[in-house]
Amino acid sequence: MKAVRINDVSKKFGDVLSVHDLELDIKSGEFFTFLGPSGCGKTTTLRMIAGFYYPSKGKIYFDNQDVTTLQPNKRNIGMVFQNYALFPHMTVDENIAFGLEIRKYDKKTIKEKVDRIRGLVHLGPLGSRKINELSGGQQQRVALARALVIEPDILLLDEPLSNLDAKLREETRIEIKRIQSELGVTTIYVTHDQTEAMAMSDRIMVMENGIVKQIGTPQEIYHRPNNRFVATFIGETNLLTMKVKSIEGDTITVENDAGLTLQGLTENLAAGLQINTGDEIYVSIRPEAFESGPGDNTITSIIELIEFTGVSVNYFLRWNDTTLKAMIISRERAIMQAGDTIELHIPKQNIYFLGE
Amino acid sequence: MSKKSVDTYEANWWSRLTQSRYFVYILISPLFLILFAYVIYPFYTTFVQSFAGENTLVNYKKFFSLESTANLEALWNSFYISIISVICCAVVGVMMAFLLERYDFPGRRLLSILVLVPMALPPLVGVLSFTFLYGESGIFPRLFQQLFQLEDVPFALKGIWGVIVVHTFTMYTYFYLTASAAIKGLDPSLEEAATSLGASRIRVWRKVILPMLTPSLIASSLLVFMVSMASYTAPLMFGVERTMTMQIYLSRTNGNLDMAATQSTILSFVSITFLLIMRWYQNRRNYQNLSKGVSVHRSEVSSKPLKFIAVVLSFIGTLILILPILVLILISFSKDGAWTIQILPTEYTLDHYKALFTDERTWRPIWNSLQMGFIATIGNIIFGVAAAYAMVRLNFKGKTMLDILITIPWALPGTVVAVNLIAAFSTESVFTFNQVLIGSFWILPLAYFIRHLPLVFRSTSASLMQLDQSVEEASRSLGASWLYTFRRIVIPLTLSGVLAGTLLAFVQSIGEFVASILIYNTSTIPLSVAIFQKLYAFKFGTACAYGVLQIILILIVLIISERLSKGSAGSAI
Ligand SMILES: Nc1ncnc2c1ncn2[C@@H]1O[C@H](COP(=O)(O)OP(=O)(O)O)[C@@H](O)[C@H]1O
Ligand SMILES: [Mg+2]
């Protein structure tokens, strides 16, 4: 298992800058995810790690070895492609054995390893099937087995679930995570699906337009987004533009033109953000940050719209042109209706202050 | 210690080179070198020679002079023949397509198989069988002469019209293939809708069907025109001397090489212009998936008299299509020299076939052609696969150029290719390792290689385009080198495409006549030239036995290709 270090890497295609000054340390054995909207440079970064692209600038290290321009076949990586890229003229076993043959194992060892990995991905009896006789989910497992059987130092997966239907996607997600933790292989996973990223990863890198927006654990990314992009891209949030009214001790007070005043804590200020009284900043409040009844930041408002989802009730509250969504776990049976007045509050520690 | 540093140095040097943006140009330079040496350079020497070596326009003045109009007449004739050929081919091809795609009648299935027979006939053999059947001393004219006790044969295929008939027979398939593909894509409900709106049959044709066929008609017209301009065998056999190709041939045999070069340059100009128009037209036209349409329901011919006519017509069609092969088989068993004024040969023998396998002088040309075709095809495979890979997988400037350069020799008349080769390789040159190629064994393999450049290239690029690049990358990521990947993944997955082009190139090389006749070397006579010579020595039997052999070879290849394309369709995901 190797660690990956990406040192000030940029990648240009012609004049298009796909990845910009990327700094990244991935620990040995870690499950690391690149998350971001389509076209943000995830695949480009992954392919530089795999060796299919060379960086225009910067260096890539596996542990201490500089692999920046090493050929892909010399890197001992396992890669799972979005469309699986299985060899259509070979059977399941031949596909899996391909990398082992290159590594010149003897026949007996190859058979043992292939059998073991086929068991691990639950493809037990399908060894002699042709690829086009497999379902999408099964093909996906063959691709995974083929990448894992060579005991790669690093496992790379590029949106491996995007071709599966919703149910299979969840199942396979759990499966990949199980196998990964069983083998403990350093894994880099590319996805644009935040749920997937949150559920599987040790750490996540959020990207936009070739730039890293934040690197952190799922909890950090979710609860302590560094900037507006991360806050809105991950999960749901009420993002308000507000003016800093005062900063006293550990308390920040902000207000907006709609007459809404909120108080939060300086510890919830995004890393590196400097503010002064009078500045405009973004305030992020997750819908589930609201609590019933009075308390910090009590809000009394008419309910504009109400949504019952089973687990929770969503209330949409409105001040002039500011709308807030509050989500309350539905314990009581008492049902409020649109037009009723509701009293909620937002605990200070649930309010986050962000820059652009 | 020191070794290690050398290693790193070399690795750096190598990786710096392979990383370079310009590395790809090192990879593709052999392709361009070959094209330069064997396409551009010969072309250029001909061009230079056309100015009589002294930068004068003497030859061009002669060509266009109004005093001796042989050349202008030839140019006009070539145009004239080509245009009439296009029209005739269009009428026959489109009619056949409609008949076979739209109507059901007794004998349709047989006819729909035989309709492609002309493609299986090597050009020389095709013309040969036509002269045996319909020429001045052919079977049918004589049959009618005897039936009606006439002084002279009532009709005979000869001159320009002979050429046109042969063109129609051999080239209507271009129209047939594209038109039937288009018709398959025609939604019959469109026609029905138009009819239900009160449009007359002619109106439906003019307003609905014709516009939808137009793209395929234009593409086929350009192609048939180009092939007709290049046609040499038919004018030769029917004695039409005033065509461009024949003029070139005559200038060359009269030793007037400068004039041959001038004529070649002018004809090349026409051909390349048409090639470029064709490319432009095909790129402009948006490709619809024609085969996706609703499957056409064939209307059955039901009324009694119509059915009778249909049966008779399809019988005649079948006969016309199959007779060329039958007559070749028949004559291949006839005794040489015994068939003079009779309708059919009178004495038969197996000698010609025996000779094919036992008589050294008889099987020599076959062996020569197999050898030369084999060498040329190996060249085609190496070049075609490399060029296809570069074209599909690499990124470089000059792709269009590469594509055009590969296609040009195919668009050029064989006669012109031969003249170009004569101009370039009658003397020593660096491209031939300081050998004179003309008069040597190697000139024909080279000519075949050049004429069939695009065949392997096209079929291989088509199958490469279907092969997802990530499959190659998967192999690389598993530790396979580029070469190993190429061997284990790329080659097996594109094999059917490579083979299809290879077989085609091989068969065409075996049957090549047009360039061969101008540059063959007397000690290694190819099969087609041997057929021609036997014909002029009145050894019809042997000539036809050669022809039958060629047709059998072609049929085998067609069957294998058919299998291959089916196989690949089955295994493709
Ligand atoms: N081979 C390439 N040539 C040119 N541009 C590319 C290439 N690969 C990616 N790009 C560009 O780089 C940007 C990032 O692409 P990519 O890494 O594939 O995004 P993602 O995987 O996050 O969807 C896109 O704007 C894309 O158009
Ligand atoms: Mg991507």
Image (cartoon, coloured by chain):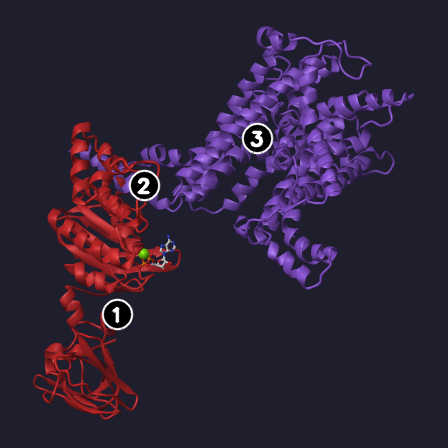
Residue name at image x 18 percent, y 52 percent: A175
Depth-wise, is mark 2 or mark 1 nearer the camera? Answer: 2
> Of marks 2 and 1, which one's residue comes earlier in the chain?
2
Residue name at image x 15 percent, y 72 percent: A223
Could you give the CA–CA distance between mark 2 and mark 1, rounded to whole angstroms? 37 Å
| Image-based side of B460 in relation to A45, left or right | right
Disc 1 CB within 8 Å of nearest ligand 1 atom: no
Residue A75 locus on image (x, y percent): 22, 42
Q: What color is chain B drawn in?
A: purple
| Image-based side of B331 in relation to A285, left or right | right
**Above-or-below relation of B220 to B163:** below
Residue at the disc numbered 1:
A233
Specify the subunit that label 3 lies on. B
Residue B450's mark? 3
- In the image, the chain rendered in red is A
**Above-or-below relation of A194 to B316:** below
Residue at the disc numbered 2:
A131
Specify the subunit that label 2 lies on. A
Residue B91 in view of the camera: yes
| Image-based side of A38 in relation to B149, left or right | left
Disc 3 CB within 8 Å of nearest ligand 1 atom: no
Three-letter code for the amino acid on which mark 1 is drawn: Phe
Depth-wise, is mark 2 or mark 3 nearer the camera? Answer: 2
Q: Image quarter for residue B252?
A: top right
Q: Quadrant of the N terminus of chain B?
A: top left
* Image quarter where ligand 1 lies: bottom left
Given residues A101 and A67, the one toward you in this image is A101
SS state under label 1? helix
Could you give the CA–CA distance between mark 2 and mark 3, rounded to whole angstroms? 40 Å
